[in-house]
Amino acid sequence: MRKLALLFLIALFVFAQTGCAADSPADPEPVPDAGGGTAEGYSPLVPEDNQGEIDREIVKQLQQNHYNKVELNDAFSEKFFNAYLDELDGTRGVFLQSDIDRLRDKYEHALDDELKQGQTRAAFDIYNTYQKRRIQIDQWALDRIEQGIDSLNIDDDESFEIDRENAPWPANAAEREALWTKQLENQLINLRLNDLDEAEVEKRLTQRYSNELKQLRQTEPMDAFSAYMDAYTHSYDPHTDYFSPRRSEDFNIDMNLQLQGIGAELRSKNGYAELVRLIPGGPAAKSGKLKPTDQIIAVGQGESGEFTDVVGMRLDETVQLIRGEKGSTVRLQISSQDGSQTKTVVLVRDKIELKDQAARKQIIEIERGGQTVDVGLITLPSFYNGTAKDVKNLVEELKKNEDLAGIVLDLRNNGGGALGEAMKLTGLFMNSVPVVQIRDADGNVQVLGDRNDGPLYDGPLAVMVNRLSASASEIVAGALQDYGRAIVLGGQTFGKGTVQTLMPLSEGQIKLTQAKFYRVSGESTQDRGVTPDLTFPAAIDPSKIGESALPNALPWDRIKPTTFPYSDEIVQLLDTLKRGHTLRIENDPDYQYRVDRIRLARQQSEKTRVSLNLEERRAEQETLKQQSLKLANVHRKATGEQPFENYAAFEESEEGEDPQEQELSAHTLETGDEVDAYQTESARILLDLVEAFIREKQSAAS
């Protein structure tokens, strides 16, 4: 089931997918048999007494207060209906086409009326149909596994389509069984590629489907109502959510207890616990071995404890396995999103301290014309209370260096935080000027800025961003770019340009979008984010991560710009800077190695179909290893290092980390560690800019 509840494992805050209650209980709609086996333990859910009232409250809040003014009509009903189907069966393998036809005929254009009336009949009819079909599948899978996994054919030339987002639903029970046979074969191959023997594979698959069956049989009315309300709120935009009382309570408990975790944000998607974001300074980020879209398939305690398969397990139960005492070890078996690559990651649980997310400085030494030139690097993983003060102190320390030629501000992977800190930070590099505009749902625009007595630093400045730079980071980068104060380098940012607020309900609360951010230029940061002046190859696929990858994200637009002083000096020099950058990176082995590895990783992540032949998959895995080893040894030869003897030696080294994971863990470097290739190139581009300014002034003076 695809649920978008997020769990912050920084302290492992639980947002369990739960619901509230219903208006007036009624006999549940019967689910047609349609073949496909028995559904032992299936018990249709019925609405609880007050869920209709909660329904009406949520509708009222969204209609009155949401930024996006939506009319509840047949067009919205159709959108909501499809969102609910995707929420439950995002890979289109559970419902039968006959189910879809029946449900579409009854509800596709009726949900708007049900919402207005506080009716939940559709919510439970659709959910009960899903639940019964899923129980049938899990019972069938367990029966098939009990027959022996050797009955599954992993020696022929079949393949499996792993991207089923737009696939047709199975026409009948026989077609669905054929689909799930391939699913089982793919899962079997993935486990075998993880070096598990046949007995362990059979045990893990049995555990997987038993977990899911147990979860399905324990489903409560709140689960159906919450899934329905999630689909409704997400039909407005992806950041609007309903929190049931239990979901809100779990969050507050975890905030207070400060439970230890791995420092990651998770969601449940299609039965998998999927990584959404790594918290800077947390064990997951520091490992350099995890990235968003990775899926946790099993959890083991300690250095050698038995693995528990968590596919199909409730997300809150998975969280309980990952939690533990500070200093204790947890092992995660990780699968790539396409299931073609698996690995084990060992983490030591810890509490994330403020210092782990605090700003820090380094000096990048660049060889230039036979001399060493110093460029300051300030790395900022997040915006927290005191950010601007900390950065101010770091800038003052850097300014003591008489040879300082410029500063690079690295905002990569910075997911945002306190808006006030973002404005103060911008003010360290500029005069007292507007920084951001905020427009509310009624069209009122507020212009915010930082009041100061002048910039702390007015020298050459570059800002680094990537796809995980979001919200407050985008405001800073956008403002410095709009004024022409800094050159922005890296990748397209996330595009999170909306403002949310929590509102209480009679039971639970709702988080809804009430406003949008706009740059001083009038352009929104929503959806499109900030486009760098010079772009570096991105390890993160923007079609999979970012605001534009989220269903129903609010669109980009623009409003009237503020009056602001603009310098086009940087824009006028961009062509010159791009030429210098292109020529230099062609002969930079570190940069080229990073680009080559990103290209290889992106090729793998773009696969939508996998072979169901075990030996063919093993050969593909070995080919990928040899390609990675070859790239590493070409790089080592170019830099005068000894080549790796084999893949095992490469894998144990830092070079063996996935380039996406290296980028995402860039902010785990401690002061004094080597900077990465993109930071070095950013410093070089900044020096190119300084030299270009000097040439321009000399030319103007002559």
Image (spheres, rainbow, N blue to C red):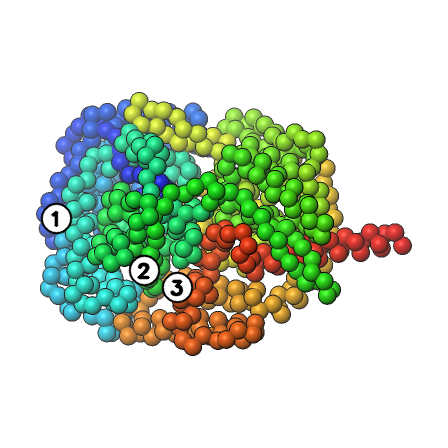
Category of crowding for the residue at label 1, using alpha-carbon neighbours closer than 10 angstroms: few (below 14), some (14–19), many (at least 20): some
Category of crowding for the residue at label 2, using alpha-carbon neighbours closer than 10 angstroms: few (below 14), some (14–19), many (at least 20): some
Q: Viewed as shown, does residue 513 lie left or right of 428? A: left
Camera-nearest residue between 396 and 261: 396
Residue at screen point 25% across, 47% down: 321
Residue at screen point 33% across, 24% down: 505
Residue 314 in the image: above or below residue 27: below
Residue 477: image quadrant is: top right
Image quadrant in which the C terminus is located: bottom right
Residue at screen point 53% across, 56% down: 673
Residue at screen point 20% across, 70% down: 153
Residue 624: image quadrant is: bottom left
Question: Does dot 3 land on a helix, a strand or a loop?
Answer: loop
Query: Looking at the picture, which amino acid does disc 3 mark?
Result: Lys
| Mark drawn on residue 344 | 2
What is the distance, in whole Å, between disc 1 and disc 3 at their CAs? Answer: 35 Å
Question: Does dot 2 land on a helix, a strand or a loop?
Answer: strand
Camera-nearest residue between 480 and 389: 389
Residue of label 1: 39
| Mark drawn on residue 607 | 3
- Residue 17 seen in the current view: yes
Counting from the top left corner in percent of width and height, residue 59 is at 36, 28
Question: Does dot 1 land on a helix, a strand or a loop?
Answer: loop
Camera-nearest residue between 234 and 463: 463
Residue 450 in the image: above or below residue 265: above
Q: Viewed as shown, does residue 645 lie left or right of 491? A: left
Q: How many marks?
A: 3
Query: Looking at the picture, which amino acid does disc 1 mark?
Result: Ala
Q: Which of the two marks, 2 or 3, is nearer to us in this view? A: 2
